[in-house]
Image (spheres, coloured by chain):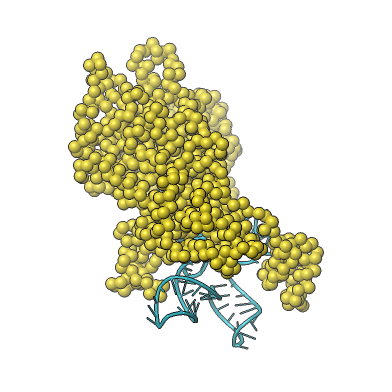
Amino acid sequence: MEYNFREIEKKWQDYWEKNKSFKVEVDRSKPKYYILDMFPYPSGSGLHVGHPEGYTATDIVSRYKRMKGFNVLHPMGWDAFGLPAEQYAIQTGTHPSIITNKNCDTFRRQIKSLGLSYDWDREVNTTDPGYFKWTQWIFTQLYNTWFDAEIQKGRPISELEIPEEIKTAGKEAIRKYVDDRRLAYYDDAQVWWCDHCKIVCANEEVLTDGSHEKCGNIVKRKNLKQWMLRISLYAERLLKGVDELTDWPDSVKDMQRNWIGKSSGAEVDFQLEGLTNKLKVFTTRPDTLFGATYMVVAPEHPLLEKIMTIEQAPKVRKYLTSASLKSDLDRTDLAKEKTGIFTGRHAINPVSGKSIPIWVADYVLMGYGTGAIMAVPAHDTRDFEFARKFELPVNCILDPGEAAGDIRDKVLAGEACWTEDGIYINSENRAKGITINGLNKEEGIKNITAWLEQKRLGKETVNYKLRDWLFSRQRYWGEPFPVIHWEDGEIEVLDKSKLPLELPALEKYLPGDNGESPLANAKDWLLVKDKNGRKGRRETNTMPQWAGSCWYYLRYLDPKNPDVAFDKETEKYWMPVDLYIGGAEHAVLHLLYSRFWHKVLYDLGIVSTNEPFKKLFNQGMILAFAYETGTGAKVASDLVEEVDGEYYHKETREELNQIVAKMSKSLKNVVNPDDVVEHYGADSLRLYEMFMGPLEATKPWTENGVKGVFGFLARVFKFFSNNDHITNEEEAAETLKVLHQTIKKVEQDVVNLRFNTAISQMMIFTNHCIKAGKVTKNTAETFIKVLSPFAPHLCEELWEAYGYSESIGKESFPDYNNKYLKESTFEYPVSFNGKMRFKIELPVDMQVSEIEKNVLAHDLAQKWTIGKQIRKIIIVPKKIVNIVVS
RNA sequence: GCCCGGGUGGCGGAAUUGGUAGACGCGCUGGACUUAAAAUCCAGUGAUCCUUAUCGAUCGUGCGGGUUCAAUUCCCGCCCCGGGUACCA
């Protein structure tokens, strides 16, 4: 029988759709398993071969788990807000939903053509008002929550106790007090602004030279009122939570930890000379306080106006102007020379009592710590560089010791920087009763910190790199904030009964004035009045794309519920997500933001688990071969010719190098899954995606590889669909052994997401059967079941041909039987001085002394021992024999 | 710079509580089938050397050391490639 994959795949896809084979509901009689893919952004260019990689992996696990008796939730949906649709709307004037829905249709059709076992009744779309109603609702929950640091927990704003002195200060003070504690707050924030396009640019739209990606004009900073989320308050919770994620890759956990960036140190107050104010700095090295020879504040530091002296003010202001013009990248480029200027004022070093100058420099960032530092050039590389350039004193206070070698003298002389441990010198002030001379770093930090706390000059502090989350965008195509700004300054967040707040239709999608979103032009929508005639204006910002993707895994649980985001009992049944697979590019932000929302919802009692995703796995990227000349110029693939394994430019005849690169239109190396399905079928595409290599690896696509697995599937079909190959006799022992090895290996590999080796084992089994010529019906059926999660269409077809009317997916996954796997003999490799020379087959349970006798009696053993002395014989049962001779 | 991956045949990749390096697939070579080609099937395929052929020998998992009876696997020091991040005090 011919392997007519087109007919077979169409038939079974229709069957699954008609029978709703993958529809699930809560079923308490079965254990649940929730398998989630990172849902895609439905771009205009359709699916690429990278998408099916993760989807096939989760599909195999889903089908396998169902066969193991689990109630499997496996949904798909669309992360459909986003810039491209808006850009298209600006150009064509059509509503973004039109192009978005068209793209979703394409994606859905393409995904369905791969035979993936999603429950399509649970499809979600973040742009659907029925969906974003609840995104908006969650925003209102954030707005109405404060973080109780005492118990490290989010609590309803109604439970916030307001201090007496605030209460007596009046309504305005109370409002401010409360607003300062909400998890969502409205504040000034800096954004990139393009004067030419009159538009706010995302960070990634600003190129390294500070120009706007779209128009090439230089962007500048602008302050705009923005919605922010206080994720930083959850830093410690998010950090601690990482430790619980035992089924996450260590690399992702590391990235999350680094992003949160916890560091412990101390805040220290420096008295400003000639002023009553103190300058607060954060340092992780309070122990180096004696070495602080100057201070630096960030250009945006609020005290700077006071700090700069009249004489220095013009120069300082000039510096501030030039600093503000720099792009982020200019400012943070490590290669760049440090810049700065003296403010004219000094401060008192609290331990030494010495007067030290205060500088302003843009290598100090306002966004971290206190925006001011004490500079210890002898023991900090950045401070050292700065001190060298501006000829500021370098005082060594930490002796590196003998181990440092030549560099030690330089360090002691203040000519080199030492950031490692050592023994303190010059760190004593008898008058103030402090010395750490002779101590090491750890003891030094402890002593100084204790002294600072005792003298009330500073305190032990923890700092996090994690900053509050800028949660608004000046765009049309996003969730509108359910917010009204009333003329009296009150901010109203809409009640659930008024949600969803839908986007108004517009004629033009161009941005509003002064950086407002296009929504500012929708006057009818924008301006509101309450029943008392009070005027208000709706929020014109919209939410970022993250919003919809932060909680979609929860809506899948109960996607059509009109009354709540999801039913409580349903949530309890399905959560947490048992397996989450997606690209590594989401290792930090998406996963951190989702975890943050989840923790808030957990604190409010809305979800039942502390963390949303139990097991996480990142699939690797799929690349393609590309070609370049000796000088590194890329050549489009259609201009390349292969001759005897060498590559040449078709026109210039220049020899080219084959490289691996991202698929791109310009390189003409893009592979479209539709074409692969058309030529080889969905089962071949699925199998090849899994056979290419480990799921997590980055790997190049080759068409010949698809041909290879296609050939395998064709052989499977040809062999197992032909009755001549089925015997009624007893199964051969060897076949049973390979069969059970295969069941065992495939099962283990699927559980561990090592699909490439599972497929390899199934190839070995098939090769064995073809050689053997005949297998029993039982063997054939068992194997088809094992293969079915991988190549479901083909296996359904064979299953039906074997006379079954129910889907093979309803069968149980076969169990392997150890009795077929037991070996009676083991073929020992015999090594001499570690080199394998020959093999000898011996009973598995043979005693070590017997093995030795047998090995030494072997003909070939003579060859390697003759004229030599046997020093030692190592025998590891069922592993190896090694004989040491000399 | 820092953090995280990774370097194994012509290619994608197997094999790590240290124990036969190169499973499986691609490609290539030879053969069968065919008027021929494609498809399919069979055999071979790390390199070098020896041999008429067998049998066999030496080398070989990025580089240099080390531990061990035994190292792709463990330790130390480098090199290269990919990804992330950007002066975080």
Find chain B in the image and tell me its colour.
cyan
Answer with left or right where residue A266 lies relative to residue A143: right
The chain whose colour is yellow is A
- Of the pair A619 and B58, the residue shown nearer to us: A619
- Image point (32%, 33%), residue name: A129
- The answer to whether residue A293 is above or below residue A646 is above
Quadrant in the rendering for residue A843: bottom right
User: Which residue is more in the foreground, A530 or A327?
Assistant: A530
On the question of residue A574 being in view, the answer is: yes
**Total numbered labels:** 0
Residue A444, image x and y in percent?
56, 35
Residue A295 in sight here = no
Position of residue A710 measured from the top left corner of the image (x, y, whole percent): 45, 63
Q: Position of residue B7 (x, y in %)?
A: 51, 62
Residue closer to the observer: B84 or A590: A590
| Residue A118 image offset from top left, x and y in percent | 44, 45
Give the vertical position of A776 relative to A504 (above or below): below
| Residue A685 located left or right of residue A634 | right
At 33% from the left and 65% from the top, the residue drawn is: A637
User: Residue drawn 38% across and 68% down?
Assistant: A657
Query: Please, which residue is most extreme toward the top here?
Result: A168
Image quadrant assignment for residue A243: top right
Which quadrant of the rendered structure holds the C terminus of chain A? bottom right
Residue A254 or A343: which is nearer the viewer?
A: A254
Give the residue drawn at x 78%, y 73%: A857
